[in-house]
Image (cartoon, rainbow, N blue to C red):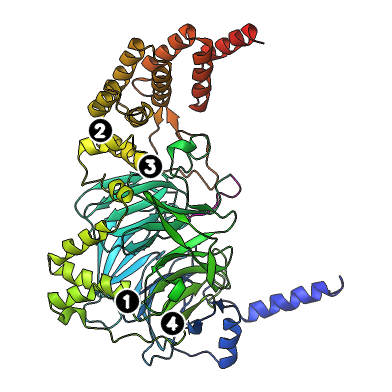
Amino acid sequence: MPSRSVLPLLFLSLASAAAQNPDPYAKSGNPAPQATPLAAEQETALLKDVKVADGFDVTLFAAPPMVNYPVFVTAAPDGTLYVSSDGNGSLGRDPGRGRVIRLRDTDGDGHADETRVFCEVDAPRGLVWDRDRLYLVHPPHLSEYIDADGDGVAEKENILVKNIAFGYEDRPADHTTNGLTLGIDGWLYIAGGDFGFMDAEGSDGRHLQHRGGGVIRVRPDGTGLELFCTGTRNILEVAISPTMDVFARDNTNDGGGWNVRFHHLLPLTNQGYPRLFKNFPNECIQPLADYGGGSGCGAVFIDEPGFGEWNHAPFTCDWGTGALWHHQVRPKGATFEETRDPLPLVRMTRPTDADVDAMGHLYVASWKGATFKWEGPDVGYIVRVTPKGSSAEALPDFDSLKDSELRGQLQSPSFRRRLAAMQTLRQRNSPIVAEHLQQIDDHQTDELRLATSFPERASDDEVIAAISHADPVVAHAAIHAAAVRKLDRHLFSALDEGQGHPSGPLRALQLLHTPGVVGGLIDRLGKTSNSELRRGILAALCRLHFQEGAWKGDSWGTRPDTRGPYYQPEPWDETERIAAVLKQALESSSPDEAAFLIQVMRLNRIQSDDALARVLALAQRDP
């Protein structure tokens, strides 16, 4: 270690060197990519950072100056790779840092030898290549960039969804709207960070606000914008299986009780962050696994020839634990269970994302050399991982295939080829698309098929019946579907007729802030002497005492209030009426019911002098 007398000289020397070789991009910009191969020793040094599982080969696909700061990657079927390159990372807001780079390996040696700037854009995030266009999340928007002539440079941009994230004028791209995945159902699935968005607008004029993390979906033309699920923290991307099972690796809330979680995400479900997971765990979907520390990033589902025991599984990147993890799962009712701890297929420094092409190649990106913002131009690299001894069949020209030939491609062992065939058929409006989707539906468990039917296919009566389903995930999804459809009359009928346990209809009713629901609950409270039903109604009224306050765009930070059930509880038109009923119930109820009500009021953050007085009275009666 240098002596104290030498340290000042050392600092002066370093400062002098920095002054002589300043970073010309220290305040803005990003150098143009160059197809300059690395020296052998440079490549060897970078590959020392990478370890792959037995049975796989790895090559350095690209590194600076060919590409830098890879945030997300997406592979075309032929292996052309598109990279979101963002020198600002999550905390910077300097101008000119972002772009999408197209990389090609023209001689098939596992190294990219062609690089081009496909488009320049701030904060590029999740991206998907489809035929002649790139779908790209770039806060604040979701756009398509069209490359009609295939030269690797986009000629046209169309904004599909406006303001689906905050832009740089509001905040940097941290906890923002992130990854993008194309499902075989033809929808784009967007991983939303928990800082949310105020007023997203699709191309059909449909609006959506979301305060929190979750998954948003939209058609590739920007229509049909909707919330798929909510209650995650800061997921960066979802992995979607060939049968439309959606998985994601979440991030911790920095020691606040929410660790890195592995989710199976279903429509209309709530995973619980930050409002429910601590004090109302029975009202949210539990994760498949809790991994403790780490930092979840990108994800990919691999179902490709040659991957052997690693195949047909979701994979997730974790920046903190430094690996691309393989998750072994099997169906369990309406969800899945993880059958063993995840195994690393690839280990590297700060992996950000991974994707697979239709030729059996896996691409994994590293953020090595930086943390959360600009650290100079020489940051990051991308490797290509391939099963040893594998060789892919020649890739067909999907556009030139007849519909009958595309139907044959839907039986390919390569999911990426099946997806490309489906997109081609979808572009032709072929009836084969619906046939294939029905086949997918037929392969699901009965519970999963039911749970995924609630947004559209299920009738109102089927939704109400499913609220009492033995599978808790089915029941949860049905409860939220009933609330979304505003089926209060059906719910009250189920309650009155004793269809299943009363907790199901009551959990749905407590999500509906209307005078009619409040009045219906109060009326039934006064008419029943059933202690279990009374407690359920009182709990529902406690939940309806407040509503979630109007959001003005402020951030809740990385450690938001987790008490729940609302982040911003505020009174509404029915608060006074509910408060009066609760007061009367406290005064007239039995000691057991009063103790229950006081506890539920506390959980719902209802402050009441009457509750305190009742607590003191009960204490005096039974000290």
Answer yes or no: do the residues labelled 3 and 4 have beta carbons within 8 Å?
A: no
Q: Position of residue 283 (x, y in %)?
A: 43, 37
Nearer the observer: mark 1 or 4; the answer is 1
Q: Badge 1, how many Cα within 10 Å: few under 14, some, many 20+?
A: many
SS at badge 4 = loop
Q: Which residue is mark 1?
A: 76
Quadrant in the rendering for residue 484: top left
Mark before the other along the chain sequence, 1 or 4: 4
**Is 539 positioned to the left or the right of 497 in the image?**
right
Q: Which residue is mark 3?
A: 471
SS at badge 2 = loop
Q: Which residue is mark 2?
A: 486
- How far separated are the C-alphas under marks 3 and 4? 53 Å
Mark before the other along the chain sequence, 3 or 4: 4
Q: Nearer the viewer, residue 238 or 335?
A: 335
Answer whether residue 254 is magenta in the image: yes
The span picked out in magenta is: 250-256
- How far separated are the C-alphas under marks 2 and 1? 42 Å
Where is 600 relative to 247, above or below? above
**Is 596 positioned to the left or the right of 412 in the image?**
right
Name the magenta segment's main secondary structure. loop
Quadrant in the rendering for residue 522: top left
